[in-house]
Image: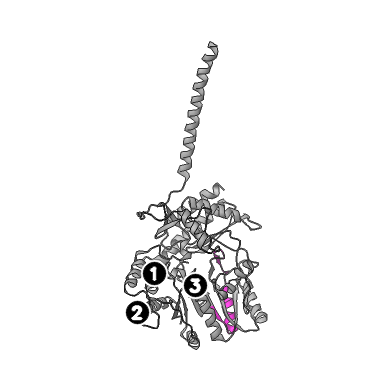
Amino acid sequence: MQRISRNIVPLGRRICRYRDAARSFSQAAQRELDDAIPRMPDFDYTPLPYDGPPAEEILRRRKEFLSPSVFHFYKDPLHLVEGKMQYLFDANGRRYVDAFGGIATVSCGHCHPDVVEAIVNQTRRLQHSTVLYLNNAVAEFAEALASKFPGNLKVVFFTNSGTEANELAMMIARLYTGNHDIISLRNAYHGNAAGTMCATAQSCWKFNVSAQSGVHHALNPDPYRGVFGSDGDKYAQDVQDIIDYGTCGCVAGFISESIQGVGGIIELAPGYLPAVYGMVKKAGGLCIADEVQAGFARTGSHFWGFESHGVVPDIVTMAKGIGNGIPLGAVITTPEIAQVLTQRSYFNTFGGNPACTAGGLAVLRAIEKDKLQENAHVVGSYLIERLKSLQDKYEIIGDVRGRGLMIGVELVTDRQAKTPAKAETLHIMDKMKDMGVLVGKGGFHGNVFRITPPLCFTKEDADFVVDVMDYSMARL
């Protein structure tokens, strides 16, 4: 018995030593893991304390009182209460890098002080009056906006949204030409009213929404998944076929984004737009450029996305970034084409109200003052290169594309077959959110990260986004 007790004591000490060693190893491993976690850039701002209802209560009310069609991102939806420039804050004061909000609404930064001041000052004096009365805020913004366009594009009609702008643009094309048929692209997105949903081919092909009579969907000039690769002329031939055989030559207009946003940040194949614009104009139709997502310096190289294609449209539509988060949209065209609206009684009650147009003018000035187009080009190019390096590291990244701060990262389970990595996209997106990065999701298959931050995004923010994506993919 005595010999046994002598053996037990040393064994107990050895167990303690092993336990201590294991704890020490675990702590070292944890420190190494912590050191690998990307650190968010410093930002000298403290959000206001939040004293409203908790997320659970808000979610309960949403489910009870909002339409079931209203969805939210993430398994555990974010409860955001404040924004400042390129960052958002939740109810607990946690900061997130907003790498998506730019395409949703924000161009020059959340709650940009100059924009907020302009809206508040105008609201204190006169919040709303129709364009039936004179107000300098509307005229001043229209003039400033027109100065940003080439050629004779200088007559503005204000709306409340991109959907309204595109509906109006198609109506103008039909009135001006006397024709009815509209050609749009498969995989495009132009809005959610009756006409724009039909021009949005995704609605017809994916959600089984019937197309209106006279709306035709051309082959999408997608360099990554398209049947003709990057050969823009071959895709353009499909538009010529529609004109020749699908519309009896009665085309009213062709509408397209210069970079498809909801469709997965797809740049149209080189040479496509010049070829198509020539075909449509020869057939007597008008060319409509949807700049709702690609406009306002987002592409960096140019102020408008269509400029990178070397074309000048007949009509341009815009929204979202035009007002940095307020409901504002616009259609701009030539004086000759604009004249056709005098033939119809078209009126927009809130389009061009003083508060929104004062904010729109402040956005234009902020983009210029803060040199945000240059920043979009410099930071966007840097971010794309970093993402392409990540593509070399992970087979799941099938494609990195975009221009400026309008970037898409497409995930696939097989690079050769280009099989969409739908579940993996959702998983990585959730993990990135948990680490403080918010990205969007798009593409026909829902497997493309849409990286479209406010234009005040920095290289440090870009590094953080890529490092968090790297960290999340490494642990997929």
| Camera sees residue 370 | yes
Tell me what residue is drawn at x 53 percent, y 77 percent: 167
Is residue 371 found left or right of 229 in the rendered image? left
Residue 443 image position (x, y, % from top left): 58, 63
Instruction: Name the residue that disc number 3 marks.
Output: 162
The tag earlier along the polypeptide, 2 or 1, is: 2
Q: Amino acid at mark 3?
A: Gly
Identity, as a three-letter code, of the amino acid under mark 1? Val
- Snapshot colouring: one colour
Name the foreground residue: 263 vs 390.
263
The kind of secondary structure element at disc 2 is helix
Secondary structure found at label 3: helix
- The quadrant of the rendering that contains the N terminus is top right
Crowd rating for badge 2 (residues with CA inside 10 Å; few <14, some 14–19, many 20+): few
The label number, if any, that marks residue 136 in the structure image: 2
Q: Residue at x 50, y 56 (%)?
A: 60
Q: Nearer the viewer, residue 8 or 270?
A: 8
Q: From where the camera sits, is residue 310 visible?
A: no
Query: Mark 1 sits on what residue?
Result: 363
Mark 3 or mark 1, whichever is nearer to me: 3
